[in-house]
Image (cartoon, rainbow, N blue to C red):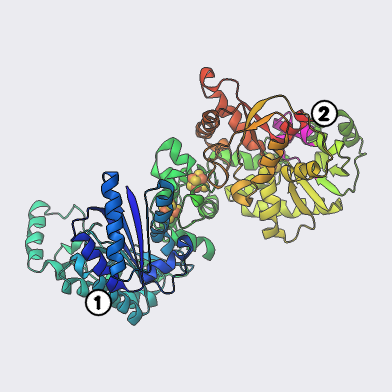
Amino acid sequence: GALALAVFGDINAAGDAVTEVTTSGIKLAGCEIMDKFSIKVVEKALGKDVTKIEALLIMEGDGAKDVVVRDMNRIGEICKKYGVLEYEWTDNPAKREEMMRARGGLVPTLSRIKPGNRLVAIAEDLGVPSTKIPETIRRAQAISQKYNILIATFGHVGDGNVHTTFVCDVRSRDDWDRLKPAAEELVKTCMEMKGTLSAEHGTGLTRAPHIQLQLGPAMEVMRKIKQAMDPDNLLNPGKMGLEKGAKTDIYDYFAFKPLVEHPEGLNSYGKAVDDEVLACIHCGFCRLGCPTFSVTQREARNARGRNALAFYLMNGTIEPSRDLAEAFYSCTTCQACTYFCPARIKVDEIVEGVRKKIYEAGLVPEPILGVRDNILKMNNVFASAKADRIEIYPPALKEKAKTGQLKAKAKTLLFMGCVPSYLDMKMVPSLLKPLDAAKVDYTTLATEEGCCGFPLFLMGAEADFHDRAKRLVEQMKATGAKELVTPCAGCYKTFKKIYPEVVGDLGLEVYHSVHYIEKLMKEGKLKLKGNGKQRVTYHDPCDLGRAFQIFEEPRNIIKAIPGVEYAEMARNRLQARCCGGGGGVSANIPEMAVDMAAERVRDALAVGAEVIVSGCAACKDNLRKGTKAIPKDERGKIKVMDITEFVASAME
Ligand code: SF4
Ligand code: SF4
Ligand code: SF4
């Protein structure tokens, strides 16, 4: 197939061009029109100055190649006749996708026009004779101006479907008061055009106030049929306004009613998170990225399902419950959904907001509470002994730590984290090896190092997290360090982003081991000989990649090691698949975490990798479990290593 894009400075001319195209024997597989308000919304994606554009046509041709080429050229000639500003067409799949990106992103992006605004499904699905489309669009624009309410219009020209899409602050009665007469005027316009109120979307509740206008006397006949078939009105009560005496005021039918009555929010998560909840328009694109949906195929384990639940909790329709807790404590907070979402909804922040409420309601799943108790009682996630935190140190350093000879002050503070200290046998020695080789002046908190509190933050234990943050920052400051280095992605995110929100400036620079190792390599302080020929891929930890866009540093390190043949997985960087090791899921639902890890390992196997390198203790642990879950003949000898370990093993 091929796609043509025609840009017009006059909407009537665009309408005339379409009429001639569709009546001249050219077979179109699709034809879309966008008005100036819609175009403005996707200006960035279009990459054009849109000030002089009134309408955009996207036309799709399909069939034998020579016919498509002929038709696309003829469309160009017709458009030229009507004064097209720009016309281009392509049958290159990548270019076609680029052209469609603006249109695909339009609907969710409408929710991003202003914080707290979102599109509202009311009078948004008109069907008019296709020759009446330009006039309908112009009249919708006039109504928009008259009532000072945004109506962005786009439509499918072939079938006369016009989406007049209202955007407003759904919490504002003032907005609804302007929206209501605007919608009514639009409905009347549609009737004058001899159109229908429902072209392709369901009729349901939103059309109920106006359906009588369209159906006239037929409405009474339909009511009688409904009464005869469903005397107790059990089926779809309220839909289409079919009950006698049904209320047909706009407020009676809206899911937003509780928010209109309580604009401050019945159960607010705070304005910023509430705005995220409202901006989601439930399109479902996030399914493509969500790892928990991928392994369960359940909507309540997908970003959209979680957003819907968050919305109903916010407006007081549902209460915290165990089921709700399972939906939210099964999220890895990986943000993959955000980067598959055209509106970039921050679902991880919504999840964190809901978890706080569930925590306050005392409904947190038991395994998660176990982690909290371990941290509060033993200062680490495993309930291990405090003295054992340094068991993993190399002998000389351990001796110093045990005899109190570690430097009290140093330029660099190393923060190992719980998993590298207690669970992983290689990360701590592997971090120290390059630092020692480069003669870095460092110290550690040794047995006084405790969990950074990230798991407390993730579970919603706000007060405990704040206490911990304040205490740990005091300990850090006492070392006089100018910089902190950690090999744990979770600790990095906690120190870099979350602590400053709680305690302000930490007084030191926070680095992840990938930053530090790359810096030492650039300074020529590390001599690397490699480990022979190896095909290696890199798994982006969510808390480094999507959270901070730390993508190139680890790849630069890996590629600089002699013998490495680097292979990139299909899903990488912003769209990397989450390994399932984050968000507390591996503690709460370990089987599900392993299923997610196995999917990620299969991504690596698909590019022929022999080693998966990552930059996070939790990723390494979970990916190893995922590897073991794959049959031996399929997984071969694939290995999982942390980047510190990969570098240390490649040093001379
Ligand atoms: S979060 Fe999902 S459902 Fe909501 S707007 Fe984004 S992609 Fe659509
Ligand atoms: S943060 Fe990750 S696990 Fe949670 S909803 Fe989004 S994609 Fe799914
Ligand atoms: S984020 Fe780091 S310190 Fe905190 S629990 Fe995880 S490994 Fe331990």
Check whether the beta carbons of the residues at disc 2 and disc 1 lie within 8 A of each other: no
In the image: residue 276, left or right of residue 388: left
The reply to whether residue 363 is visible in this rendering is no
Q: Residues within 10 Å of mark 2 (few under 14, many from 20)?
A: few
Residue at 21% across / 57% down in the picture?
237
Callout 1, which amino acid? Glu
Callout 2, which amino acid? Glu
Residue at 9% across / 60% down in the picture?
222
State the mark number for residue 571.
Answer: none
In the image: residue 178, left or right of residue 454: left
Residue 398's place in the image compared with 27, above or below, is: above
Q: Quadrant of residue 535?
A: top right
x and y percentages locating residue 334 in the rendered image: 55, 45
Q: Is residue 261 magenta?
A: no
Label 2 to label 1, Cα distance in Å?
Answer: 78 Å
* Closer to the camera in the image, 274 or 366: 274
Secondary structure character of the magenta stretch overall: helix
State the mark number for residue 185.
Answer: 1
Please state the extent of the stretch shown in magenta in the rendering. 414-431
Q: Is residue 416 magenta?
A: yes
Q: Quadrant of residue 85?
A: bottom left
The residue pinned by badge 2 equals 652
In the image: residue 40, left or right of residue 34: right
